[in-house]
Amino acid sequence: MKKIINSTLLLVAISIGLASCRNKTSDKGTITGDSLQQRVEVKEVVGIAKIEPLNGLVDLASNEGGIIESINKKEGDSLKKGDVILSFDTKKEIIQLQNLNIQIATQKQRVEQDRANERQYEAALREKSATLKVSEELARSGAETRQQVETLRKEQDVLMATLEAAQKSTATNHLMIEELENQVQQLESSRTDKFIKAPNDGILLSLNAEIGKAVEAYASIGKFAADEPLVIHGEVDELFADKIKAGQTVTIHLIGSNERIASGKVISLSPILQDKSLFYDEPGERNDRRVRRFKASLNKETSLLINKKVTCIIEL
């Protein structure tokens, strides 16, 4: 009986003690259960970003791919738009072009022969038609047999059919020439894809290429930075996506440092939420949350290198 009374007294004492603790934390302004319902005012949003040209970095790739034949530029080179960075082996395309040009020349000769045949058949047909007309007039007066007239008419029909066949052959050979010329244009276009050229004025940042190396179509083999203003390409967590606006002030810090190294303003915002992207190098840095991407200007020239990762604080 004494054990039961003692246990009851102990529970009452614990309850009183807990109630006393809750009252004290409330008096100090610590968030209580009721205060969790209150809206917390957010004054800053932290995002992660990289220094890149205004329109980002460009992947260098070819629509065709092939075996690298020559490398004309190296990492760090300043390029003009259209400068050839590297070229692929085009021996196969050159042989195909030669064969196509031979076929085109052959078809043109056939067209000339068909036209000569047409002229010959046209002349023979005119002569046969004139002879038939005379024979028909003689037959009406009894000076020519009907059998001779029918023979001439059949010969005329044969010449007409032969002329039509020659004309169709000419048209067919014309179409074949057009088809071959289209193949030449496609092959010439394909040959232009056998080069990787600078898309704009800018700098070749990286190039993973060796002479004799096979490269697949559309495979990236380098990075290019256009000659554009450097800006901040950043991301903020979806929880604060609706709080950032164009024109808000941005301060830039090195990762893990409180020192302000640059500042700017938000200049553009993505209209959608996206998965976390290139700014997260380690697998552990990614999670299922999405982000809103933004760009921010830099108020002055900075010594930060392209692709440098930084922290951004956006003032709301």
Image (cartoon, rainbow, N blue to C red):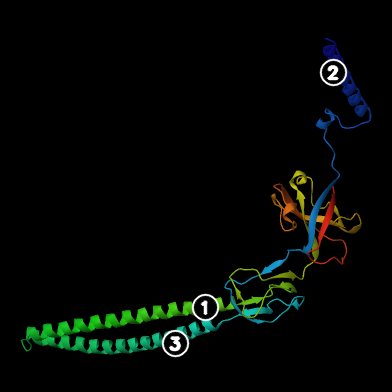
Numbered disc 3: secondary structure:
helix
Query: Percent from the top left, x then y, of residue 56?
Result: 73, 63
Say if mark 1 contacts mark 3, CB within 8 Å. Answer: no
Camera-side residue of 63 and 18:
18
Residue that badge 2 annotates: 11
Camera-side residue of 219 and 301:
219
- Residue under the point 43% across and 77% down: 179
State the separation of the CA atoms marked 1 and 3.
15 Å
Residue 116 falls in which quadrant of the image?
bottom left
Query: Percent from the top left, x then y, of residue 84?
Result: 67, 79
Residue that badge 3 annotates: 102
Say if mark 3 contacts mark 2, CB within 8 Å. Answer: no
Badge 3: residue crowd in 10 Å (few <14, some 14–19, many ≥20): few
Residue that badge 1 annotates: 187
Which of the two discs, 1 and 2, labels the residue nearer the N terminus?
2
State the separation of the CA atoms marked 3 and 2.
104 Å
Which of the two discs, 1 and 3, labels the residue nearer the N terminus?
3
Q: In this view, does 52 lie above or below 96?
A: above
Quadrant the N terminus occupies? top right
Image-based side of 197 in relation to 312, left or right: left
Which of the two discs, 3 and 2, labels the residue nearer the N terminus?
2
- Residue under the point 84% across and 16% down: 7
Camera-side residue of 106 and 57:
57
